[in-house]
Amino acid sequence: MAQHFLLSAKARRLSLTQVAGLTDTEILALLKKARWGTEEEQVCSRCGIRHFAYFIKTRQQWQCKHCHTRFSITTGTIFQSHKLSLRQILIALYLFTTESKGLSAVSLSHKLNVQYKTAWILLHKFRESLNLTKDLTALSGEVHIDGCYVNYYLRPKNFQHKRIDRRAKRNQRKDKSCVMVFRQRAANQNRIQGADRSIVAVLKEENTQDILALTHKLVKPNSTICADENPAYDSLALHYQLERVNHSQEYCSIDGITNNLAESFFARLRRMITGIHHRMSNRYLIHYANEIAWREDERRKSIQEKFNELLNKCLSCPPSRHFVGYWQGNKRPPVSFGVSSLSDNQQYHIAA
Ligand SMILES: [Zn+2]
């Protein structure tokens, strides 16, 4: 039997001791390569001109030869004004990358010996970079879609006479919401088995209007969509080749129809909720769901590749408005649902 990818030497390639053992010069070289693609030239964070800027060794900063602005390796990126050392940031990035279902802020704060608040912000900056740089080009071919409810659990009262009907709509939690996923089956199943691209959105509930709008945006015409028996998906039959599987009777129809690509995504999401975070507020739900989408899509890449990719994404994102000054009261606006949940945080970003 072939060896599982995660057990292979290729999947490892990078270790915590390697990352922690980098010298300051090596760390700067790594970040320069990730940010500007070369160790020689720099791109001014203000005027954007690529050139050999003056390096001020004592401050570890550059001065632009055109506009005379001074900038460091993190100026204009999501790590701007960082309080942690670059080494701590890289170690956190490594730990975040190697987890399969996510990393909790408490766990990271213990590993780095920093406050919970510091770890929480850093992890959310990683998630925000993933969310801002996600690829929203429409999916094609075979696309599996489904919704998964979160924040729905109601704890039963102790006394039997005080218990309520937890199925009734009037008794449900106000913050109950639904994560929708669209997953495209890889065109070459020899190269990668299962899905190769996933896009997530957040809905209040699975309803025809939102599902139709999202599908039009995220799935190319003439694609095949596999969905379960929920009537909210019925209207898709007018626009796409729609295949159904009735989960109350079977998980795989006699013709081999499933929507298991979506279900396997939810398996990982539910494990993340029960095993790592325990609670996800709706305000940051899209970040967590998109993190799982990234982990699913990159599951066949080595730690080294994933580490470099995440680092690139972080260094290409502008400073975050919501996680700078978060504990001083600067919070993200309340959650938006439907199509706007795909990109609602982009408009709140200041330019680099
Ligand atoms: Zn400049």
Image (cartoon, rainbow, N blue to C red):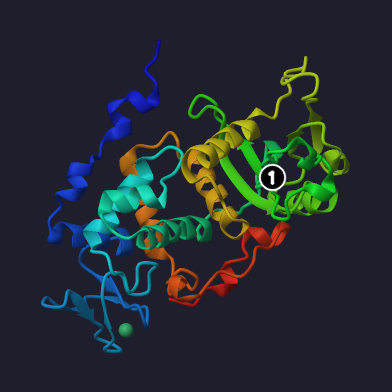
Picture residue at 21% right of the left edge, 48% below the top: 19
The C terminus lies in quadrant: bottom left
Q: Is residue 98 above or below residue 253?
A: below
Disc tally is 1
| Res. 61 visible in picture | yes
Q: Residue furthest top?
A: 1
Q: Nearest the camera: 349 or 279?
A: 279
Q: In the rendered view, does 343 fall on the left or right side of 115?
A: right
* Disc 1: which residue: 152
Q: Position of residue 47 (x, y in %)?
A: 37, 83
Ligand 1 closer than 8 Å to label 1 CB: no
Q: Position of residue 337 (x, y in %)?
A: 71, 59
* Quadrant in which ligand 1 is drawn: bottom left
Picture residue at 23% right of the left edge, 43% below the top: 16
| Res. 186 visible in picture | no
Q: Position of residue 27 (x, y in %)?
A: 19, 58
Q: Is residue 76 above or below residue 211?
A: below
Picture residue at 68% right of the left edge, 63% below the top: 336
Q: Amino acid at mark 1?
A: Tyr
Q: In the rendered view, does 29 fall on the left or right side of 209?
A: left
